[in-house]
Image (tube, rainbow, N blue to C red):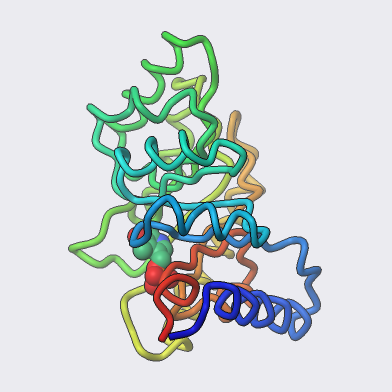
Amino acid sequence: MHSLETNLNNVRQRIISACTQSGRDPKSVTLVAVSKTVNVETVQEAFKLGITDFGENRVKELVHKREMVPEARWHMIGRLQTNKVKDVVGTGCLIHSLDRWNLAEALQKRAEKLDLTVPVLLQVNVAGEKQKAGVQADEVLPFLQSIDQLYRIRVMGLMTMAPLSDDAEASRPVFRELAQLRKRLQQSQIPNVTLQYLSMGMSQDFEVAIQEGADLVRIGSSIFNAS
Ligand SMILES: *Cc1c(COP(=O)(O)O)cnc(C)c1O
C-alpha cells in the first residue's frame, strides 16, 4: 500500500512531465482530486499535502466535506438532480456537469432567488455513448446560444468523460474533439459564455488529456486508491 503522499507526488510528477512534453506551463493545469471514495480525514490529509481542489459526484458528500474543509475549492462533477440544486448554488462550487436544459433552468431559478451567478461547465457527450450524460457535440452551439436567456449562468468551459478503456490513447480523439469544439465556439462569441476551461482526463488518461489541452484534470483512484 502506497501512502497518500507517495501517490500524490507520483501524480504531480506525471502532470509536470505531460506539461513539459507538450510545452505547457504546469501551473496552467489544475489537479482536482476526486475524493468520492474517501472520508473527511483523508481529504484533510490531502489538503495538508497541498491539494487545493476537490471533486465529488454526490451532493450530500460534497456539502458535508466542504463544511469540514471550507478552505479548499470544491467541484461538483457528478450528475446533478434538479431537487439538489438548492444545496449547491451559492456554495462557490464549480459545477462540471451541466448536461441538460431543465437543469440549466433550475440553476437559473435558484441563482435568481439568491441574487448571484452560477459558474458551470457544460458536459459534452463527445463519444455519443448512450449510457453517458451530456449534451451531444452537435447540440452544444444551440444549447449555448439559448443559455443567454438564463442570464445567471456563466458557462466557464466544457467537460467530457472518455469511454472507459485500459488504453489512454483511446481517449485522445475524444479530447481532441472537445478542444476543437471549444475553439470553434470561442469564435462564435456567445454572451455569458467564456469557455476558459476544459475539464477532461481521469486516472486512466490524464496525461493524454493534458497533451490535448486540459485545464482541469479530475483524478481519483491514482491518488486515493493506488496499490
Ligand atoms: C470518479 C470520477 C473521476 C475520477 O476517476 P478516477 O478513475 O478514479 O481517476 C473523474 N470524473 C468523474 C466525473 C468521476 O465520477
Q: Quadrant of ligand 1?
A: bottom left
Residue 205 drawn above or below residue 136: below
Identify which residue is drawn at 74% across, 81% down. 22
Q: Nearer the viewer, residue 57 or 149?
A: 57
Nearest to the observer: residue 185 or residue 62? 62
Quadrant for the N terminus, please: bottom left
Q: Is residue 130 left or right of residue 19?
A: left
| Quarter of the rendering containing residue 117 | top right
Residue 30 falls in image quadrant: bottom right
Evaluate whether residue 201 shows in this view: yes
Q: Compared with residue 222, is residue 104 higher up or lower down, i.e. above or below?
A: above
Residue at x 49% of width, y 72% of height: 223
Residue at position x 51%, y 71% in the image: 175
Indicate the position of residue 137 as horizontal and vertical percent values: 39, 57
Is residue 183 visible in the rendered image? The answer is no
Q: Residue at x 51, y 60 (%)?
A: 33
> Which residue is at the far left?
131
x and y, in percent, of residue 81 in the image: 24, 36
